[in-house]
Amino acid sequence: MFKALTACLLLVLTFPIYAKEAQQVQVADPYIDLRTGPGKGYPKFYVAEQGHWISLLKRKTSWFKVRLENGTEGWVSDKQLIKTLTPSGKSLDVRKLDADSLGDSHWGLGISGGDFGGADLVSLHITYIFTENISTELTLSQALGTFSNNHLYDISLQHRAFPEWKVSPYFTLGAGQIRTDPNATLVATEDRTDDTFHVGAGVEIPLARRFALRVEYRNYLALTSRDDDEEIEQWKIGLNAYF
Amino acid sequence: MENWFKRVFLASALFACAGTVAAQQSEGGQAHAVDPDLERQEINIDAIDSEDFEIGLYYGILSIEDFGSDTVAGIRAAYHVTETVFMEAAYGMSEAGETSFEVLSGSAQLLTDDQRDFNYYNVSVGLNILPGETFIGSRWAFNTALYVIGGIGSTEFADDDHFTINFGAGYRLLFNDWLAMHVDVRDHLFDSDIIGTEKTVHNIEFTAGFSVFF
């Protein structure tokens, strides 16, 4: 266990090593504001004047921590950073961070809740984006019903037919497993695990930079060991972030 | 306890690895985006270190309805989407005490020791509503935020999993850019029939903890 802890600590501690020498930009507008923290609510405490060079140190959400030549450090919004020039004289390209679209994101993280054949559903998923049309998703869900609880593990492939649309519909197809645990208060029946297939469709509505509301329907087919396979409908609503 | 530690460290290792992969991903992207013939000093926004992920441990008191109060320990991981919104996943462990009925009757036991384990996980969305600064003496100023948070999850108690809604508020104080302290009050609600009749139980939790941004 100690080894695991050490490995974990090392992993976390080596992160700053990836950080490169700070990149510098030049203030092009009459001035830009520096705030004490990464948010609109934090007060402005300094201004960097036109012509000054500022080093970009790090980013938190859409705020950049910068250092001026005199050593002053503060936070600048991406909107203000557009008003700076790169060493080659071009204006800084921060559009990617502002875009409603997924931009250069490759990973997504989502949480959702809903209904799985009458049971309450809690769900967490990780998305990997291959292209703007195709992505794959690993979903872990738990459905909590009156008589039984289900754990679902799914891997699915998604296709976005119209990635350029602001509200983007998608289709999903995948397979996985479902584990059914009957509730303790019932007469003891055995836990069972079945393979599943699902098809579904959903829509994503952007809320903020790389952040979307998602509504999804899936139709599950559980290949049970009983005489009949079981069809289960799932509805869920959730939030998705891309990074 | 051993099991709990394993879970905590496996989860942190998992998140750390996910972060590394994401970092390599962005560096890979950069390699393609930058034409080697161009000036070396061109700015690449993606190469700037971002600190939007947070992982932390917490410890506190959980009041389990009808079963007294006990300590609770947990792990939380969050992704900060914007300056206002963050998503959080948490896993906490506690153990229920005895109901007053069990205490007064002397020997009657409603639950076995194993059934008294109270473990929960949840996924929540938080909103930083009151950002600000706290001043300690004349030299120190720390960024703070008050946040409200709510979500859904599952609680494993008395051999059953219960669909659980949680909501609450917390206070985050950042010692520097990457180290924060949290104080959090949360209510975990679920329907339970453990003591005979079905009812909605409230389990109020008060915790404090530390987290790192990466």
Image (cartoon, coloured by chain):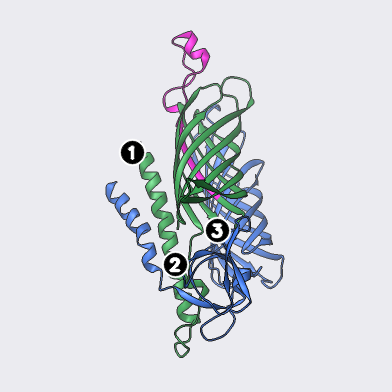
Chain colours: A blue, B green
Residue B204 location (% of width, % of height): 56, 31
List the residue tagged with mark 1.
Answer: B2
Q: Chain of mark 2?
A: B
Q: Amino acid at mark 2?
A: Ala
Farthest left residue in view: A3
| Left or right: B53, with B4 as reference point | right
- Where the N terminus of chain B falls, by quadrant? top left
Q: State the residue at coordinates (58%, 70%).
A: A134
Mark 1, mark 3: which one is toward the viewer? Answer: 3
Which residue is identified by label 3? A36
| Residue displayed at 56% across by 86% down | A89
- Which secondary structure lies at badge 3? loop
Which residue is identified by label 2?
B23
* Residue B150 in magenta stretch: no
Is disc 3 on the same chain as disc 1?
no
| Magenta residues (range) | B88-115
